Image: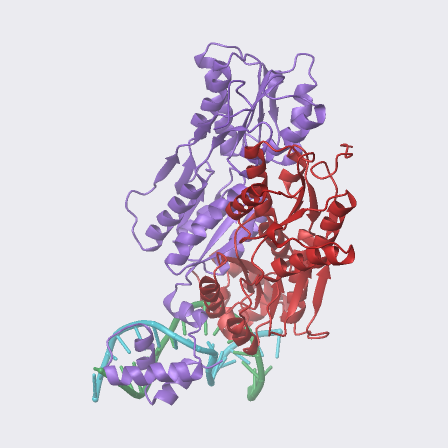
Chain colours: A red, B purple, C green, D cyan
Amino acid sequence: MPTIKDVAAVAGVSTATVSRVLNGERVREETKQEVISAVKALGYRPNQIARSLKTQKTFSVGFVVPKFDPFFMQVAQAIEYVLNEKGYSLIVCNSDENLEREIGRVKMLSQQQVDGLLVVPTSGTASHLVELQQKGRPIVLVDRMVRDMVVDCVLVDNVNGAYQAVEHLVTLGHQRIGLINGRLEVTTGEERYRGYQRVFEDYNMPVDEELIGIGDFTIESGYLLTKKLLGLSEPPTAVFVANYEMTIGALTAIHELGIRMPYDLALVGFDDMELTRLAAPPLTTVIQPMREIGETAARLLCKRMDGDHSDYPQMYRLKPELAVRGSSDPAWRSV
Amino acid sequence: MPTIKDVAAVAGVSTATVSRVLNGERVREETKQEVISAVKALGYRPNQIARSLKTQKTFSVGFVVPKFDPFFMQVAQAIEYVLNEKGYSLIVCNSDENLEREIGRVKMLSQQQVDGLLVVPTSGTASHLVELQQKGRPIVLVDRMVRDMVVDCVLVDNVNGAYQAVEHLVTLGHQRIGLINGRLEVTTGEERYRGYQRVFEDYNMPVDEELIGIGDFTIESGYLLTKKLLGLSEPPTAVFVANYEMTIGALTAIHELGIRMPYDLALVGFDDMELTRLAAPPLTTVIQPMREIGETAARLLCKRMDGDHSDYPQMYRLKPELAVRGSSDPAWRSV
DNA sequence: CTGAAAGCGCTAACAG
DNA sequence: CTGTTAGCGCTTTCAG
């Protein structure tokens, strides 16, 4: 691999001049051309590592997700797109919904000297993030928050999303409405739970604790909790499932039990993936703006990496939207 | 951020000694302890960039995918897992099924000095990859091949997968079998096409070109091609759809047209995602071993990065498996 | 076993 | 406008 020295030698100039040409600084047109042809002749490409060491800028950012699932990957795609526009590359890491691993990944990214970090935190603990932050690396939390940390974040209004979902079920006349949710330490879990509760408050209905299932946002746990709820002596007539993976699990259980939606059970799920419209019947879901989440987070991070610290800390609360379809509404008809 | 110098100063030793401790070389136990406590006291973390510059090893590898879709992300997850075990981090890039972008991403990764590269090539052109390869960077192609390049690759036996799918349909008595496929320049497209053809050869049946739809592996094109096939004066009685995204598109069209599977139309799709078992009826699909693809590719790359060039070039052809379910087989019953 | 010193490839003052 | 020079933070001979 040729270095800047080789280029300088071939072009008959100093390395400084080559560097200037490479970085678009003013250089006499003639010498510039010589440098350029030397670069071409050698097939030279600047070594980003060396550049980074000097400039303290790596043009890479990390994104730590709890899972490579469709939701986070859609967000990742949007992030990657925005970042690449600005010359950054994205290092995607999987924390596996496990704090130990999350800490490991963050540490690794930190040592790789990423210019910024996007994290979907696995739990409420934040010390490893705070540490990084204090070293001056911009961090933006995505989709989930942590307590005890002042930090930029891009979130969805989960309370509102859950509220819309459950209120919709109430409006349809349901009283016994089950909730299938993830761990409450995860802010999305806690917020969706709050949205659920709030509907009961507002409509002055009692909450039956028996109908509240707490799992871990996986397909498996959605499946198990649904089975459990439907096996109660007085099963719910409607269920709200608080994320995509659990929705898949719930559907599996429902299919298995031969339960017909929306007649035997009305269901509102979460996230608008392909599955949603293709299921039979099509699923009523709370749609999260995945693309917008990613773009917003990436732009905010870029702003911070550019040294613009205005309005810190900034918190976005993007609005989810309820799409009513056949799984909840007997009157629903395809367009 | 403290540097190795600071640690050396605090510990009262030279930077060389600190480096030795950090890298596990033999150092007198006593001095070692002093270094360790200095490291802790300062919260020191080695700068991977500086280390990389010296050692010519970045402990990062790139993965270029045509899309952040479920199939590639499952593969990515497996890759990430294996790589992280060995201390590497994974930079995931999206070529958007576009050669220009692919070249851009590869160039970026090359400048980031990744230690190795995993690529799902967008097209048959390979010059940008050959170039990198000649610079001594290990490359492993994943899922797709390119012509005119001697390179390690981890592929699926697509001919066989398609063959199984189509033969299954023939066995069920179908004669007019549609094919919904991606571009033939993409090797997976070409191979699945060949598997389709081969069944017709082997069973001595004529291929009706009218029933062959060539799209681009997207949901949209799966949708359009399905509509087109089903709108023929003599529509097929069965369809084989050659990837997951197109399968989703096909299902959308089928639902829209109110066609009942498997009675009006038998369908075999590709890839075993959640959707598969939850669709009504459950989908017969060709299952690709996504996890194995990722693990195999990652291990092979690691081997190359470790300097082991035995059996070069190595080509894996992992075996897909046909899962027969209700969308093709009237006799199918859920377990 | 440890330290001094060179240098990985590049950029950025500072001179000229 | 261009060259010289001094590092960025780390590893690695080579001496001691």
Spot the residue most to the front. A233
B48 w.r.t. B247: above or below: below
* Image position, residue B263 (x, y; %): 60, 17
Q: Which of the 4 quarters of the picture holds residue D15?
A: bottom left
* Image position, residue B274 (x, y; %): 54, 39
In the image, B129 versus B274, the foreground residue is: B274
Q: Is residue B55 left or right of residue A140?
A: left
* Image position, residue A294 (x, y; %): 65, 56
B302 w.r.t. B312: above or below: below
In the image, A202 versus C13, the foreground residue is: A202
* Image position, residue A332 (x, y; %): 77, 35
Whether residue B226 appears in this view of the structure is yes
Whether residue A10 appears in this view of the structure is no
Query: How many numbered tags mark residues here?
Result: 0
In the image, A29 versus B261, the foreground residue is: B261
Residue at image coords 39%, 61%: B87
In the image, B81 versus A329, the foreground residue is: A329
A326 w.r.t. A89: above or below: above
Residue at image coords 52%, 41%: B71
C15 w.r.t. A192: above or below: below
